[in-house]
Image: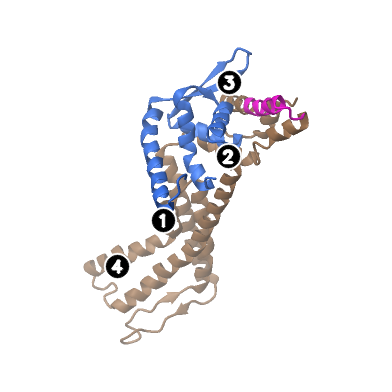
Chain colours: A brown, B blue
Amino acid sequence: MSDWHELVKQRLKGIRLTEQETAEVTEELAEHLESVYLTSRSEGVTEQAAVEQALREVSNWQELRTKIESSREKETPMNKRVTQFWFPSFLTLLLSQVFLMVIQASGPKPYVSPALSGPPRMTPLVVVYLTWFVTLPFIGALGAYLSRRAGGRGATVVSTIAFPVFPFLAFLVVGLPIALLLDDHVAHNITLPAFLVGASAWVVFPAIALLAGGLLVRYLFGRCSEARGNANVNA
Amino acid sequence: MVASGIKRGTAELAVLSVLESRRLHGYEIARRIEQETKGALRFTLAALYPMLYRLEKQKLISGAWETSQNGRRRRCYRLTAAGKKKLVPLRSEWSELFAALHRLAGVSNV
């Protein structure tokens, strides 16, 4: 007969619980495995097959450790918001800004749109850093991964993915109108088409690029979780 | 056979339901669910305990160590007052869903 307690203790090594909690979980899981084994034996199954039957109860111990940690964790709603939204959002915002600065400083030349109307020197031009766009799907994917890994769902994950464009959106929607009202030297020559082109270049297209990578990871993460769920809740 | 997604969704209902009438330890919960659903729902250890701990954290069930007559120490779970309260709307939601599926699919047993 196997030493189920020792087996579970070894497999749960490194679990992030208190000593007492670890001991209790180990005892409880060992008890369960022993019950599976004893039931199989009482039904006439050979010793080897009964052991195998018990071991099949857990296909991935590392995943079980993570699930137990998260299910026993005493987490406050504030902690959840931090891990699922604020931390991944600010990390991806920081990364996107660092990449933008590096590309501006030493990357390839940006695409500069021609003047839409009016005298060329009076109409604002739109500067588009195409190389930066290439990095955005990866940044969106990272945001989605971190948020989903922390248990984020639905709107939280989507907001996290799109977060790096929020400062540009805030500037266009709030900052620019205030600047126009308070100081007529600032951006007084911006026309509606130029505003829309600017919004597309700094908000709409970057958001699409972020979402392309982020939603793909969100979908793949969902598929993996579903597959793991199917493996654990067997037919 | 009930689809896997529905099974996962009904897992919480299954656990709370079997604990409604008596205290059970983890292995008994898994056995009872398997027997009462004629094998349609089967919980492995990996699926069961994270759920039990989560339900306990939500104070829907509570666990306590007990020693049986043969000297085996086991953690038994019982439904709390909050769990009983939660079970009522949960049953009604799933009952409505199955009734809707029944109407939609036009089958006698969903």
Crowding near pointer 4: few (<14 within 10 Å), some, many (20+)?
some
Image quadrant holding the C terminus of chain A, namely top right
Mark 1 vs 4, N-terminal side: 1
**Amino acid type of the residue tagged 2 in the rendering:** Thr
Residue marked by disc 2: A66
Residue positioned 70% across, 34% down in the render: A53
Q: Is residue A41 magenta?
A: yes
Element type at mark 3:
strand
Crowding near pointer 2: few (<14 within 10 Å), some, many (20+)?
some
Q: Which mark is residue B74?
A: 3
Mark 1 vs 2, N-terminal side: 2
Residue marked by disc 4: A176
Element type at mark 1:
helix
Residue positioned 60% across, 36% down in the render: B44
Q: Nearer the viewer, residue A109 or B99?
A: B99
**Amino acid type of the residue tagged 4 in the rendering:** Leu
- Subunit of label 1: A
Residue B69 location (% of width, % of height): 60, 12
Question: Which dot, 2 or 4, sits closer to the camera?
Answer: 2
Contact (Cβ within 8 Å) of mark 4 with mark 3: no
Question: Which dot, 3 or 2, sits closer to the camera?
Answer: 3
Contact (Cβ within 8 Å) of mark 2 with mark 4: no
Residue marked by disc 1: A159
